[in-house]
Every structure is written in C-alpha cells, then in structure tokens.
Amino acid sequence: MRITACPRCGSRRIYAGTMGDGVLVGYTTKDVCRDCGYQGMPLIFGMVAGFGFAATENLLYGMKFWNEGFIVLISLFYLRTIGSGFLHASATALTGYGYGLKVIKKRPFKSILPFFLIAIAIHSIFNLFALSSQITNQIFGTVIAATFAVTLLILIRKKVLILDRKSMHLEIQ
C-alpha cells in the first residue's frame, strides 16, 4: 500500500522519509509530505518514548535489586517489562496523540492538557493496584495492574490501526 495524498493538507507531494525526518521505520508509515511535513502517527511516537522511559526505569530498578539474587532480578524485569513497559507506552501514547493533534490541527498548547491528565490518571490507577500488593502482601494487585497495562496497550494499538486506516488515502499496488 502507498499513500497517494497527505491526510493533513491533501498534497500529492509525498516522499519516503528517513530517520533524519523523525520517521521510525517499521512502526508507522515512512511517507512524509513535502508541503506540510506530516510524518505519520503521533500515537506511535508517544508509545516509543514511553517504552524508552520504561526500559531506563527498569535498568535503574535492576541495579537496585542486583544483590537480591537471580530469580528476584528476572522476576522483577519480567513483571516490570509487562506492567511498567506497557503502562508507560500507553500513557505516553495518549500524550503523544494530544501533542500530534496540536501540531497537525494547529491547536493551542493547552489542548494537550486533557490527554496529559488522562495519562496521569491511568498511571495513578496502575500505581494504586501495584501499591495494594505491597500493602496487603498479596500478588492480586500486581496481577490486576499488569492486566490493566496489557489491556491499555491493546486498546491503544487498536486505535492506531483505526486512525491509520481512516486518516490516509491508500492505494493498493
């Protein structure tokens, strides 16, 4: 499939973007508009930023728990990768979506705030579930937190696919 017109300005002057254009090859369309600079899905860019943050946070936690033993370390990375990684990807995707709407639709900067507040609320709910496991010494809260994060990522992915199909004029080659 190939984009034949820019979803933002309608221009037919489309070219294959590179990493220098900010295009994440393999994650979204690599087509960039020569007239307005449209570069694909802001949800994807937000998700990538969230995964990067979560990976850094996981490494820091890993260094903290290094002396606790191999099983504890592997368990920590497994739970944090699923829970924290998916949570940060989903929450940051929402903020990225708000920012993308600001840029693409030329909205004021304050238009990002509702998306940012939703991301904060999502993170707070996740933390509440995770904290409940520490307080009660039960794993139930952690399981719910991880399930919550996985569900969010699935919903965000579906939204990406819907927006991708809806916003671009595609032509099958």
Image (cartoon, rainbow, N blue to C red):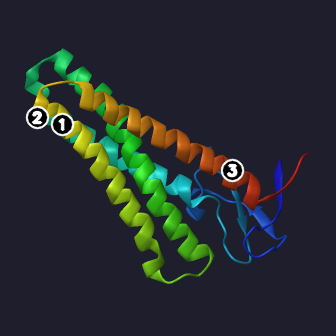
Residue position marked by numbered label 2 in the rendering: 135
Q: Between label 2 and label 3, give the one nearer the viewer.
A: 2
Q: Between label 1 and label 3, give the one nearer the viewer.
A: 1
Q: Within 10 angstroms of label 1, few (less than 14), some, or many (20 or more) residues? A: some
Q: Within 10 angstroms of label 3, few (less than 14), some, or many (20 or more) residues? A: few
Residue 60 horizontal side relative to residue 159, left or right: left
Residue position marked by numbered label 3 in the rendering: 162
**Which image quadrant is residue 143 in?**
top left
- Residue furthest to the left in view is 67
Marks 1 and 2, Cα distance to the nearest angstrom?
5 Å
For the question of whether residue 29 can be seen, the reply is no
Residue 137, above or below 27: above
Of the numbered discs 1 and 3, the one sitting upstream in the chain is: 1
User: Residue at horizontal 53%, vertical 39%?
Assistant: 154
**Which image quadrant is residue 107 in?**
bottom right
Marks 1 and 3, Cα distance to the nearest angstrom?
35 Å
